[in-house]
Image (spheres, grey):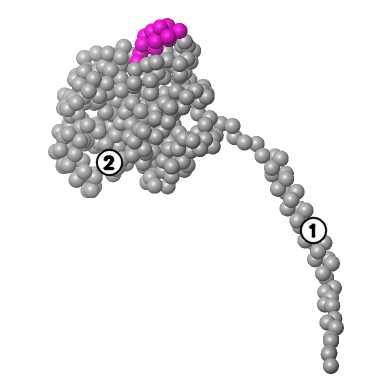
Amino acid sequence: MTFSARVPALYFPGSFSLKKTGVFLGGWLLTIVLVKILSFRPNLDAPDFSNANFKVLGLNMPSNLAFAGERVPQNDYEIKESLEKEFFANKTWKNSSLALFSRAQKWFPLIEPILKQEKVPDDFKYVAVIESHLSNVISPMGAGGFWQLMPSTARNYGLTVNEQVDERYDVEKSTRVACRHFKDAYAYFHNWTLSAAAYNVGIGGIQNALKKQNTNNYYDLLLNRETGSFIYRILAYKTLLSNPEHFGVKNRVRKSGTFPAFKTVKVDSSITHLHAFAKHLNTNVIILKTFNPWLIGEKLDNPEKKIYTFKIPKNKNVDLSVYFSDVFPQAAAKDTSLRNTVTDSLKIRKDTLKKTDARHKPKDAHN
């Protein structure tokens, strides 16, 4: 005998209303998504990392590169090859990316307002990056400072360069001189890319190359190795430093902080002994020269009564290590006694630091 049973259908009074609610919510969400899509406006100035054929640090190279608002043509094989070389083969900028980003955080806020005041495009700050890595280095040819000015060029633009004073190491003054050079070049070429290249080889050098090769475009020129890669190297550093999160740099760099508050002291007379002068200002020679790196001698002869402005940090316990290696990189590396004195002094309070003044003179700072 077979038994069968009929299972009664389950009935939920609210089932119909739940279905209606689900349909309503689904339609509402779909409407929001469509509105978002239709209202999206891409940032055309943001780097486009969609070019998967070129990778730097394991990530894509931007396909919409520009320098000072002037687009970089990338539909030419030789240009792509030059870009690829700087982004891939140049290991220096990759290995130093953390240090560079830390320095950029510190020095760009000082350089950027000057570029703006001088009406020079902001991208020119990257010239200082490739010239000196934002430090007062001295080249074998004698160029010095953040902007690697030759003594004769600095003097022609009004800076003082002698055995006691070298204003190429004054970041603010040298930045203004660099701006004047950029603007002088722009007056000739009416092109910022060519003006940047002229900073490397000279206005005359670019003029001759343009004339001989019958072109007015940097990217069409055959130049020496250094000048030929100059703009491409700028673009590599610009891409790295303006997109740190993309390259995984920002989160790995400790915040370098901003410059301390200063009091300024103006002097129009000679200073016969810097140690006595520093003591009079309630500081010491190490601090005096760290924040006034243009002062390279042990005294200051001033028969012409020129006005010199000294910066003295208001905070007596300022951390010199944040600035010293940038403003005196070669002195710190070569003068062991000076380096040890500064390093030891950073571990103790300022009143003790006064007792350990070093005889500081950057040995390589010369005419």
What x and y, as percent, mark residue 299? 17, 24
Which one is in front, 172 or 186? 186
Q: Which residue is located at x 83 percent, y 82 percent? A: 7
Residue drawn at x 45%, y 37% as measured from the top left: 55
Determine whether, in the image, residue 311 is placed left or right of residue 366.
Answer: right
The residue that mark 2 highlights is 321
Q: Earlier in the sequence, mark 1 or mark 2?
A: 1
Q: Quadrant of residue 9?
A: bottom right
* Label 1 CA crowd tier, 10 Å (few <14, some 14–19, many 20+): few
Magenta stretch holds residue 203: yes
**Residue furthest bottom in the image:** 1
Q: Which residue carries the number 1 mark?
A: 23
The structure residue drawn at horizontal position 46% and vertical position 27%, both measured from the top left corner, is 80
Which circle, 1 or 2, is nearer the viewer? 1
- What is the magenta range? 200-214
Instruction: Give the x, y percent position of residue 320.
Output: 27, 40
What amino acid is at disc 2?
Ser
Q: For the residue labelled by badge 2, is the local secondary structure a helix, a strand or a loop?
A: helix
Q: Residues within 10 Å of mark 2 (few under 14, many from 20)?
A: few
Q: Is residue 240 magenta?
A: no
Q: Amino acid at mark 1?
A: Val
Asked if 87 appears above or below 124 in the picture, the reply is below
Which image quadrant: the C terminus? Answer: top left
Left or right, 168 with respect to 194, comes to left
- Name the foreground residue: 204 vs 219: 219
Is residue 154 visible to us here?
Answer: yes
Front in this rendered view, residue 138 or 346: 138
Estimate the x, y position of residue 272 in percent, counting from the top left: 16, 24
The residue at 75%/48% (across/down) is: 31
Quarter of the image with the N terminus is bottom right
